[in-house]
Image: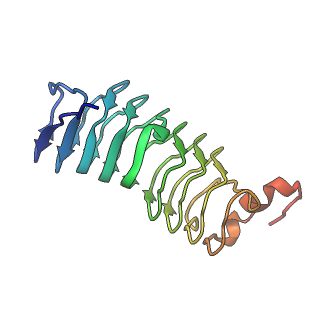
Amino acid sequence: MSTMHKTFIENKTITADFHFQQNQVFEECLFQQLSLQNQVFEHSDFVNTTFQNCDLSLASFKNCKWQHVKFQNCKMLGIKQAEISPLLLEVSFEGCLLNMIQFEQLPLRKTSFNNCQIQEAIFLNCNLQESIFDDCDLRDTLFQNCDLRKADFRWAQHYIIHPMENNIKGAKFRSEGLHGLLQHLDIQIEH
């Protein structure tokens, strides 16, 4: 069995003329104002790295690791996060457009989603314990078989979460959003 050799890129601002290859390690790097639509990242690691104002729509992160990665004001449409390695996964999203994104079987415990639009997305078999959805629009987003214990949805809007298909023990909701927990019951709630 052969060992993959990794190329290390450290403390660098990644610019539009950067040549991406397989097996790269980005540590303490800044990806800023880049159009990375349909970019293929394979067997690459992102450690203590920040993406700011980048378009990562339909990008592929096959067998990549995200450790302490921040996405700020990024567009990430249609990404399948199931390709991300769950090993040491730690990520946060601020001001991001995450429509039609798929999170499957990922340990997203304590993940911060702040001021994000997460519409028509899928969270399937994810551990979202203690995650925060602060000022997020979750319209038509599916949570299925997720661990949402102690997750904070108090300032999220338009969520629909089926309590029998997800563990919501200790999760936080505002009374204005309770209809999102009861919608599957086909009852009428009046204000």
Where residue 64 appears, as percent x and y from the top left, is 34, 40
Q: Residue furthest left?
A: 11
* Residue 155 vs residue 185, the one in the foreground: 185
Give the answer, above or below, for where 9 lies relative to 167: above
Q: Residue furthest bottom?
A: 170
Q: From the image, which quarter does the C terminus lie in?
A: bottom right
Q: Is residue 95 visible?
A: no
Quadrant for residue 176, please give it.
bottom right
Q: Which color mode does the image show?
A: rainbow
Where residue 140 appears, as percent x and y from the top left, is 66, 44
* Residue 8 vs residue 140, the one in the foreground: 8
Give the answer, above or below, for where 149 lies relative to 68: below
Q: Is residue 138 left or right of residue 107?
A: right
Where residue 79 appears, as percent x and y from the top left, is 46, 34
Q: From the image, which quarter does the N terminus lie in?
A: top left
Residue shown at 57% from the left, 60% from the top: 156
Q: Is residue 160 left or right of residue 93?
A: right
Q: Is residue 19 visible?
A: yes
Residue shown at 61% from the left, 40% from the top: 120
Quadrant for residue 45, please give it.
top left
Q: Is residue 25 left or right of residue 145?
A: left
Q: Is residue 5 left or right of residue 166?
A: left
Residue shown at 46% from the left, 50% from the top: 116
Residue shown at 38% from the left, 52% from the top: 87
